[in-house]
């Protein structure tokens, strides 16, 4: 049995129906795992109350003896997020017997309430992880919980709370700082996709380990990132307290491929930097408490943020300065974090033009933009600057009227629209995008017949119904992926001052979408 030599300790949970399955998982995970957590609550035979503890320990013995990595044993009850139906007395009987026989492996994860009812003399504290998992919606006093746990002489403390907004991860980092000061070893995790940052940055801030499944389907808690993603995408072994922090804020961000694009770009340049997804609804709190150099409560080396739906407009008021183009567009999709404040930019406008450079001379061209939201505003601004004659097509004319007026564009109703006289038709609505809008199009082949180029800003999926209809109508087509990559390369340049690895970013984005 050995530990991998690495910067961060990754513990891969082994959740299988039986020991045979657990062995197979352990063999597959050996290369990426520093430790294993054997989740006894996943096993059928540990779910039954009629099995005597002695029998269970006998069944377990070969696995413990022949373990290939340090091992944590866990028998998590349902109310703490596990699968065991055993009552507390039954679980307590099993653990007492295990300790009494001296069969406990490197670590045994015991829930705080179970420990408090177990009788301390029965335990070998040098092997105990005292844990608590909190799934309540309302925030709990984590400091008080930590203090209650820290009164016990357990080797490790573990606190996991579920979160729905990235700003709720802050108390986890406060706890890790507190444990460092107290000289206690702590595993502190925010569960749920909004907690990903605690799983990636936790070890650099003193967390004893981070849990990661071998494959996504093997996750034993919400929001777990796979061990391979932690090592290869986020480069967790190289992350330290000096690592530059970047990320994307928005809601939802779970399906964003920006972490793939930017992390690979940073890696290709050997930069000490990481890019994280931040599921954020309360953007004001996020900026104030986590990011802004004057008010933030963390000592992270922030460098930049991407901003996506629904915060591109609201964010303007939270920044110290906003680039003139972004101000005119009314939306910021890129923040550069300086020592004295936050600067906002809009790279969508340049992004929207990039794929058109070779395809069309926009000066005097007739351009139709379908939709009047944030992406349409960036496109309007860019096309007007290039000297195009733009008509906006919207489903809600009174709503779109001020936008058209602001940018000096004509306005027409989308219903019954005909695009024959346009050199370029741009879909700036979410119709066709993965999710509820998949398989929908803002225009049919019949409506598009006679138009020159059809350009879909939707990039996921890369093949949309709008593009298919446009091809059927004889139009040339451009998908949204090249815009996505173009705006990302401009972000990279604003953040780093270096030329972006464009080909690599395009290749990564294409591959990420194929897998999506
Ligand atoms: P947004 O601000 O929410 O605006 C969406 C626009 O689409 C609104 O004008 C909305 O009209 C209209 N719309 C929505 N559903 C419609 C429907 N069923 N029929 C007709 N119009 C409809 O969103 P956004 O930020 O502009 O983004 C639009 C799309 O562009 C998204 O799919 C986004 O992913 C994509 N995008 C791509 C890139 C890229 O790099 N490729 C960059 C930015 C955006 P109402 O106001 O009437 O609701």
Image: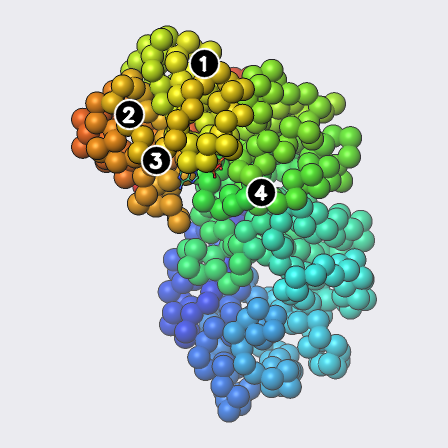
Colouring rule applied to residues:
rainbow
Mark 1 touches mark 3? (CB < 8 Å): no
The residue identified by callout 1 is: 384
Instruction: Using the rendered view, name the quadrant where residue 324 is placed.
Output: top right
Crowding near the residue tagged with mark 1, few <14, some 14–19, many ≥20 C-alpha atoms within 10 Å: some
Confirm or reject: label 4 Cβ below 8 Å from ligand 1: no
The residue identified by callout 3 is: 415
Q: Is residue 46 visible?
A: yes
How far separated are the C-alphas under marks 2 and 1? Answer: 19 Å
How far separated are the C-alphas under marks 4 and 1? Answer: 33 Å
Q: Position of residue 472 (x, y in %)?
A: 18, 32
Crowding near the residue tagged with mark 4, few <14, some 14–19, many ≥20 C-alpha atoms within 10 Å: many
Q: Position of residue 499 (x, y in %)?
A: 48, 17
Asked if 222 appears above or below 474 in the picture, the reply is below
Q: Position of residue 302 (x, y in %)?
A: 65, 31
Confirm or reject: label 1 Cβ below 8 Å from ligand 1: no
Image position of 364 (left or right of 3):
left
Q: Nearer the viewer, residue 471 or 149?
A: 471
Q: Mark 4 or mark 1: which is in front?
A: 1
Image position of 249 (left or right of 356):
right
How far separated are the C-alphas under marks 4 and 2? Answer: 39 Å
Lower sequence index among marks 2 and 1: 1
Question: Could you tell me which residue is drawn at 63 percent across and 38 percent down?
Answer: 240
Q: Secondary structure at mark 3?
A: loop
Image position of 390 (left or right of 276):
left
Q: Mark 4 or mark 2: which is in front?
A: 2
The residue identified by callout 4 is: 278
How far separated are the C-alphas under marks 2 and 3? Answer: 12 Å
Confirm or reject: label 3 Cβ below 8 Å from ligand 1: no
The residue identified by callout 2 is: 419
How far separated are the C-alphas under marks 1 and 3? Answer: 24 Å
Question: Could you tell me which residue is drawn at 59 percent across and 36 percent down?
Answer: 311
């Amino acid at each position: 049995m050995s530990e991998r030599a690495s910067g961060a300790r990754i513990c891969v949970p082994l959740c299988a129906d039986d020991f045979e399955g657990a062995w197979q998982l352990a063999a597959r995970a050996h290369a990426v795992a520093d430790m294993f957590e054997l989740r006894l609550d996943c096993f059928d035979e540990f779910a039954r109350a009629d099995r005597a503890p002695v029998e269970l320990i006998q069944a377990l013995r070969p696995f413990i003896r022949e373990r290939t990595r340090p091992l944590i044993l866990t028998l998590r009850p349902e109310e703490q997020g596990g699968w065991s139906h055993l009552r507390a007395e039954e679980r307590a009987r099993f653990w007492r017997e295990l300790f009494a026989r001296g069969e406990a492996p490197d670590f045994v994860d015991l829930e705080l309430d179970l420990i408090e009812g177990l009788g301390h003399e029965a335990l070998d504290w040098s092997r105990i992880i005292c844990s608590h998992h909190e799934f309540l919606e309302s925030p709990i006093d984590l400091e008080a919980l930590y203090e209650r746990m820290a009164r016990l002489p357990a080797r490790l403390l573990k606190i996991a709370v579920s979160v729905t907004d990235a700003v709720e991860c802050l108390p986890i980092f406060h706890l890790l700082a507190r444990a460092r000061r107290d000289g206690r070893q702590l595993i502190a995790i925010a569960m749920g996709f909004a907690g990903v940052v605690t799983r990636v940055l936790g070890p650099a801030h003193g967390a004893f380990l981070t849990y990661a499944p071998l494959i996504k389907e093997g996750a034993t808690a919400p929001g777990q990132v796979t061990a391979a993603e932690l090592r290869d995408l986020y480069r967790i072994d190289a992350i330290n307290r000096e690592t530059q922090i970047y990320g994307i804020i928005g809601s939802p961000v779970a399906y964003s491929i920006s972490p793939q694009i930017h992390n690979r770009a940073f890696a290709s340049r050997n930069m000490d930097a990481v890019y994280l997804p931040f599921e954020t609804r309360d953007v004001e709190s996020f900026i104030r408490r986590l990011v802004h150099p004057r008010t933030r409560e963390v000592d992270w080396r922030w460098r930049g943020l991407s901003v996506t739906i629904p915060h591109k407009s609201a964010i303007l008021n939270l920044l110290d300065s906003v680039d003139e183009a972004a101000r005119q567009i009314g939306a910021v999709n890129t923040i550069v974090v300086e020592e004295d404040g936050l600067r906002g930019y809009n790279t969508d406008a340049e992004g929207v033009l990039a794929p058109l450079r070779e395809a069309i001379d926009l000066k005097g061209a007739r351009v139709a933009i379908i939709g009047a939201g944030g992406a349409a505003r960036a496109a309007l601004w860019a096309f007007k600057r290039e000297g195009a004659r733009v008509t906006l097509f919207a489903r809600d004319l009174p709503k779109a009227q001020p936008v058209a007026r602001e940018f000096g564009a004509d306005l027409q109703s989308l219903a019954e629209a005909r695009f024959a006289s346009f050199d370029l038709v741009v879909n700036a609505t979410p119709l066709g995008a993965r999710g509820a809008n998949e398989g929908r199009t803002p225009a049919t082949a019949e409506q598009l017949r006679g138009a020159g180029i059809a350009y879909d800003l939707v990039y996921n999926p890369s093949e949309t119904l709008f593009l298919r209809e446009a091809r059927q109508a004889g139009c040339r087509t451009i998908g949204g992926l090249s815009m996505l990559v173009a705006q990302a390369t401009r972000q990279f340049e604003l953040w780093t001052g270096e030329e972006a690895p464009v080909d690599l970013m395009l290749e990564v984005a294409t591959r990420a979408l194929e897998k999506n």
